[in-house]
Amino acid sequence: MFEKFLKEKSITLDAFKGYEVEKQSELQREYLSAIESKVEGKATKEDLQSELATFKEGLSIDAMKSEIDKLQSKIEAIEEAPATKEEGHKTLSGAILGALKDNEDAIKQLKSDAIAGKASPLSITVKAPVTISNANTIGSAEPMYQLTQDTGIVSTIRKREMRYLANVSVGTIGSNRALWTEEVDEQGNPTFIGEGDTKAQGSVLYVNKTEDVKKVAVWAKMTLEMLDDLPQFVSFITRNLERRLDIVAENQLFNGNGIGDNLTGANEYATAFTGGSLAGALTAPNELDVIEAISLQVKQANGIPEVLFINPSTMSEIRLIKDSSGRPIWKDYVTPSGEFNYSGMRIVETLAVDAGDFIGGETSVINVLNRTGLQMQIGLDGNDLTQNKQTLVLEKRMVQFVSANDTNVLVKGDFASAITAITAT
């Protein structure tokens, strides 16, 4: 403080005020020189502000005018100095001089006030220099566009793979009802006969059967701005809805109950597992033995085993079955294409089948006919026009059926019950 400075020189403040102006100015310049020494000695911003505040309190109007003249001279010297290369890191004293230059108009006003006999305060904020980095510039707040690059990657929600349609008979239909004809009653039998004998008469009854086409659909509403500004995301939205529609359709193809608008699923047509002639015949059977029994049941129903759908968890249990030497048995039944084929059936893993369950056999007897493939429409609905929206609709019409003559070559059940059924008692 200025008063402390005077005390160090054994001068009281009252005595100072009684000095002549020249003597006062001399002491004030000496005090100012002491402050500048502190600046060069890297005094903190807070120390400097405290000293300047005290200095202003004890400074007379005339003395203040004199010191302001000095500040003005420094600013004029800065303006007249030749241009230098790009400014680098500033010292604290350099920052102070920069602040004085930036506040030149305020200093001139302060000088004018001093001449008029008014001592108004001057507040100058000295900004401490910092190291320029990502963190305290572009990266100090969101958004950080200059530091961000779009990779173009869009992470989609994972959904199960569709496995059903690749393993059944798929076709098209041109109306809203599927018709097929079944042989339901055979009369008479061919016989070997002698010369001149009467031949045996035979006949068969044919019955027409039908199944209605069913529709699965989904829709979404989007703004015109979304369609115009983000067309690439519209394609992702469309694919997402399409995949979800396909999953619902596959669930119905497996498990639909045929009631109302539901498809009649394969489980409604399939015959329950019995084990055929292996029922109650095996000691300590496992999942591979069940697959063999399924295949046998299909063959004994005059079918050709083709595909068996199981849950991936069941496949993991099968992979853990080992022979007496500890070698996994399933490896002997992997085809060159990488499929697991056992007892003449491709074993297809799908999450559409519950854990522990199975369904399959001669799956080509399952008929899936598409009335229309996947259709997409974008148009106006309700108040879309007034609200700048459009409605996206995805739909598919299809029918599934299995002739009553073929239901015995499709077998369904669960492995736990099947193992019990073929276990010797």
Image (tube, rainbow, N blue to C red):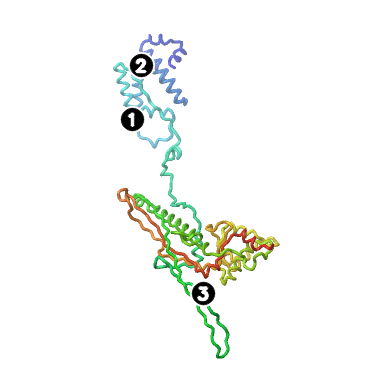
Q: Can you identify the residue that label 3 sits on?
A: 185
Examine the rendered structure and indicate whether residue 279 appears above or below residue 229.
below
On screen, residue 349 versus residue 54, left or right, reads right
Q: Earlier in the sequence, mark 1 or mark 3?
A: 1
Quadrant for residue 212, please give it.
Answer: bottom left
Inter-mark Cα distance, 1 to 3: 115 Å
Give yes or no for contact between labels 1 and 3 (Cβ–Cβ under 8 Å).
Answer: no
Earlier sequence position, callout 1 versus callout 2 = 2
Q: How busy is the neighbourhood of tag 2: few (under 14 within 10 Å), some, or many (20 plus)?
A: some
The reply to whether discs 1 and 2 touch (Cβ–Cβ < 8 Å) is no
Mark 1, residue position = 79
Depicted 335 relative to depicted 161: above or below = below
Question: Which is more foreground, mark 1 or mark 2?
Answer: 2
* Residue 424 on image: x %, y %: 68, 63
Q: Nearer the viewer, residue 390 or 272?
A: 272
- Amino acid at pointer 1: Glu
For the residues marked 1 and 2, what is the alpha-carbon distance in whole angstroms?
25 Å
| Number of residues whose C-alpha sits closer than 10 Å to that of mark 1, classed few (under 14), some (14–19) or many (20 or more) | few
